Image (cartoon, rainbow, N blue to C red):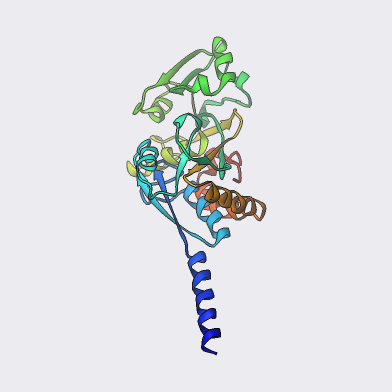
C-alpha cells in the first residue's frame, strides 16, 4: 500500500511539474504587442498557445532590439519574441503566432477612396525607414506619387497627418490606431474631436507573421504543435479580440484573426 501511494505521489508530482512548467521569453516594449504592462496582442496570443500546452509564460521586457541581444547573451531565456527576418537572431524560428497588415492611414475627412496601391497616385505619402524595400509594390508606385518621404525615428507622423502635411502614412494599422487613440487620451483630448480627427486605414500589402525564436528545437516543435491547435480551435482569435475591438473605428475588419 505504501509503495502504491509513493508511486502515485511521484506520478502526480511529475504531472504537476509538466503542467506548471514556465517558459521564459525575452520581449520588447512595442505598441500593440507588449505594452508597458507587458500586455497586448502578442502577449495574449502567446499565452493562449501555451494554455494549450498546459504551460505558463514569463515575459521579461526590454527596449526594442535589446530583447534580441538579451536572448543571445543570457541562456536563461527559452525564447525571444518578436523576431523579424533581418534581425539575425540565432535559434529555431517558430511558425507565426499572429499576423499583421500594413497599408496607409489617413484622415477620414479628406474623402480619399483608397482601395489599392494605385489609388495613392498624386498623394503625398509618408513612409517609415525601409518601407520601399519591404514593399516592392510601393517602390514601383513611386513615380506616380505626388511625393514620398521616409520619416526618421521619433518623427511625429500622426501630427503630420493631422496638420495636413502628408496625405497618408505607410504603417501597421493596429499599431497606428493604438498610438493615435492613446495620444489623444494622454493629451486630454478625445479621438474624433477637433484636435484628433477621425482616421481611416486601408491594408495594401500582404499579411506578415510575427514569430519567436527558441534556443531548443524540441521546445520550438512543442510550441508549433500547440500553436496549430490554438489556431484551429479559435483560442488565439478569442484571446486577442479585446486588443483589436477598441480600434475598429480605424482598422475595421482588416486585422487578421491570428
The residue at 42%/39% (across/down) is 179
In this orientation, which residue lies closer to the viewer: 136 or 123? 136
Horizontal and vertical percent for residue 17? 48, 67
Q: Position of residue 33 (x, y in %)?
A: 46, 44
* Residue 22 against residue 120 in the figure, above or below: below
**Image-quadrant location for residue 117:** top right
Q: Tell me if 17 is positioned left or right of 117 in this view.
A: left
In-front residue for pair 165/258: 258
The quadrant of the image that shows the N terminus is: bottom right
Furthest residue to the top?
Answer: 143
Give the residue displayed 58% in from the left and 31% down from the top.
202
Q: Residue furthest right?
A: 232
Q: Relative to 145, say whether 28 is above or below.
A: below
Coordinates of residue 113 in the picture (x, y in percent): 61, 26
Residue drawn at 42 percent across, 37 percent down: 180
- The residue at the far bottom in this view is 1
Q: Looking at the picture, tell me which residue is in the foreground, 251 or 227.
A: 227
Q: Is 225 situated above or below 124?
A: below
Q: Quadrant of the C terminus?
A: top right
Q: Position of residue 116 (x, y in %)?
A: 63, 24
- In front of the other: 53 or 76: 76
Seen from this angle, which residue lies furthest front? 3
Tell how many labels. Answer: 0
Amino acid at each position: 500500500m505504501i509503495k502504491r501511494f509513493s508511486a502515485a505521489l511521484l506520478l502526480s508530482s511529475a504531472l504537476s511539474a509538466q503542467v506548471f512548467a514556465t517558459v521564459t521569453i525575452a520581449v520588447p516594449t512595442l505598441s500593440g504587442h507588449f505594452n508597458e504592462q507587458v500586455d497586448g496582442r502578442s502577449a495574449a496570443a502567446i499565452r493562449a498557445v501555451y494554455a494549450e500546452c498546459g504551460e505558463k509564460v514569463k515575459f521579461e521586457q526590454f527596449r526594442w532590439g535589446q530583447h534580441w541581444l538579451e536572448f543571445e547573451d543570457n541562456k536563461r531565456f527559452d525564447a525571444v519574441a518578436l523576431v523579424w527576418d533581418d534581425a539575425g537572431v540565432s535559434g529555431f524560428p517558430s511558425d507565426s503566432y499572429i499576423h499583421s497588415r500594413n497599408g496607409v492611414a489617413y484622415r477620414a475627412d479628406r474623402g480619399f477612396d483608397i482601395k489599392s496601391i494605385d489609388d495613392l497616385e498624386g498623394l503625398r505619402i509618408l513612409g517609415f525607414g525601409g518601407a520601399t524595400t519591404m514593399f516592392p509594390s510601393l517602390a514601383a508606385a513611386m513615380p506616380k506619387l505626388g511625393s514620398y518621404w521616409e520619416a526618421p525615428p521619433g518623427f511625429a507622423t500622426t501630427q503630420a497627418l493631422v496638420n495636413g502635411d502628408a496625405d497618408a502614412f505607410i504603417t501597421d494599422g493596429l499599431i497606428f490606431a493604438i498610438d493615435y487613440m492613446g495620444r489623444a487620451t494622454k493629451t486630454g483630448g478625445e479621438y474624433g474631436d477637433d484636435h484628433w480627427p477621425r482616421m481611416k486605414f486601408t491594408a495594401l500589402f500582404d499579411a506578415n507573421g510575427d514569430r519567436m525564436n527558441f534556443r531548443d528545437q524540441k521546445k520550438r516543435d512543442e510550441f508549433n504543435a500547440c500553436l496549430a491547435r490554438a489556431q484551429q480551435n479559435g483560442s488565439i482569435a478569442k484571446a486577442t479580440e479585446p486588443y483589436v475591438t477598441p480600434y475598429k473605428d480605424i482598422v475595421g475588419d482588416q486585422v487578421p484573426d491570428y
